[in-house]
Amino acid sequence: MLHNTRFDRLRVGFVYADGLTQWQQVATGAFGAHWRAGGQILFSAPDRRVAPVALVLRFDRLASVHLLRMRLLGVDEANLQANVLAAAVGCALTLLFLGAIYNTALAIAVRRQFPAWLGAWAACMVLWGFFWSQFDLLMNGALAGAPSSQICTALACLAVTLATQGAVTALARDTVPVALRRVTIGCGLATGALGIPASLVRGSSIDAWGAVLGIATLADLVAVALCLGIAWRRGSGEARAFAGAWAVPMVVLATTQVVDTASLFWGGGAQMLVLLGATWQTLWISVAATHRLTRIRLERDRARQAEATAHELARRDPLTGLRNRRGLVEAVDAMIGQGEDEHSPFALLLVDVDKFKTINDTHGHEVGDQVLCRLAGRLSRWDGAMCAVARFGGEEFAMVVVGLSGPVLTQFADRVRQEVAECDHGPALRAVTVSIGIAEARGAADFQSLYRLADEALYRAKQAGRNCVMSAGRPGGDGILPASMERELERVAGIEPA
């Protein structure tokens, strides 16, 4: 069993004790049934009664003897190693493929660069593993041998470029010096550019190109490590999160440059080590990026919730909890929008506490505040889809009512006045009454016009002796409703008719 490298043709001869030599061969684009997963080629000695005594290998146009990795194995051991290596490669490629899809989708969802670079890197590693493991021969046997090796060289160098770009873009600009950032990106681009001529080489100069690529890769690793280290010291959360992911592939790539790993992983060697390191990196960064983006989203949701809470508080009276003037105006805009049809009347009721200054002067402001809170609690009973209640400040309240008009509206306002007067404020206070001014509208109308008319009606109610209801242009609170209007009042206003 030997690892696939660049040659035009390989003939393997099994020499037997009786002098017979049986030949098997593979050539570029024609490996037949000799290829195995993990970039390996297997030759089995034909079973004869005479034992084999020698093995002869003849290469045509071998790029480098230093790239050869060969092993003699028993049949059972060879089959077991080939199956285990195929399963390991399949699992690693599957995880890388899922990581590529996940990070690409994540980049689209969050519109960030580093998941996109990570997704592109994982996809590149999937392709590299696909060609290196020779799984591509299942679809196109013509790629066997040198073509697959050349494609793998180009993809490996491109993967270094993509990984470097992903590492740099993951770190905030203020955590890495500009010069170091540029140098690191330059190292990644240089490695990717060197991969183009290195992938085309077929002669003995491939050893020299391999040495150059090894130096470029080590320089790139050192630059990335410096970026992560400096960013970490400057408090970068991304650097801390990604350091664990980059540590393993960095150690792997550095190890393959200085240590002979040919015998590792059942002949998979350095390539299998790189594939496993890439899988680790993809999984780690995917989890770390998801965790960090989840935290960012939670922080954003909390900020939005706090903003919504502040927005709501800015529209609420702090004493009574009712809407303030600003909150009512916004509610009225929505309610008026529902009442633009001429058959959907709406009205503004201004509710003012009678002789409230006397309550404050006699019993104190604390008692006055308690009175306002009790009245607010009573008025809030009508707050809903058809009625918005607010405190305008001081002792003045407002109610916007949709769907009532004429005598039905006047009767509703008088019912409000009566129920407010029935509030129990304790033995120290006699009944607290209110005066109400009404302004009605149909079709398009603005709040300020309604408020002016309702205020005029409220002024007349005060002049009329307080504890009564006045409508803009007519007195209210007297008269008996017909039965049909009583039913309308019960249906629309949600109260029992008098």
Image (cartoon, rainbow, N blue to C red):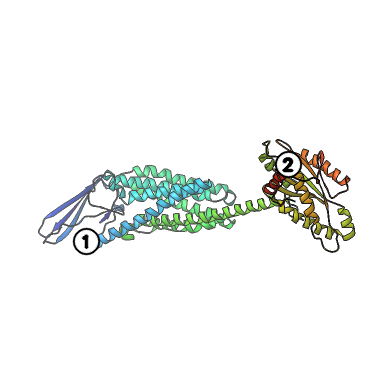
For this orientation, the residue located farthest to the front is 483
Quadrant of the rendered image containing residue 232: bottom right
Image coordinates of residue 171 in percent, x first then y, are: 55, 51
Residue 184 seen in render: no
Q: CA distance from mark 2 to mark 1?
A: 98 Å
Q: Is residue 75 left or right of residue 340?
A: left
Residue type, label 1: Val
* Rendered residue at 76%/47% (across/down): 411
Mark number for residue 191? none
In this rendering, which labeled residue sits more in front, label 2 or label 1? 2
Counting from the top left corner in percent of width and height, residue 150 is at 33, 45
Left or right of residue 147, residue 232 in this image: right
Query: How many discs appear?
Result: 2
Characterize the local packing of mark 2: few (<14), some (14-19) or many (20 or more) Cα atoms within 10 angstroms.
some
Tell me the residue that label 1 is attached to. 75
The answer to which of 356 and 419 lies nearer the viewer is 419
| Rendered-image quadrant of the N terminus | bottom left
Q: Position of residue 406 (x, y in %)?
A: 75, 41
Could you tell whether 311 is left or right of 205 in the image?
right
Mark positioned earlier in the residue sequence (2 or 1): 1
Q: Which residue is mark 2?
A: 405
Residue at the extreme left: 18
Q: Position of residue 29 (x, y in %)?
A: 25, 44
Q: Do the residues bearing badges 2 and 1 touch, measured as CB atoms within 8 Å?
A: no
Closer-to-camera residue (441/49):
441
Residue at the location (67% across, 42% down)? 334
Secondary structure at numbered mark 2 = loop
Question: Residue flagged by tag 2: what amino acid is it?
Answer: Ser
Residue 445, located in which quarter of the rendered image?
top right
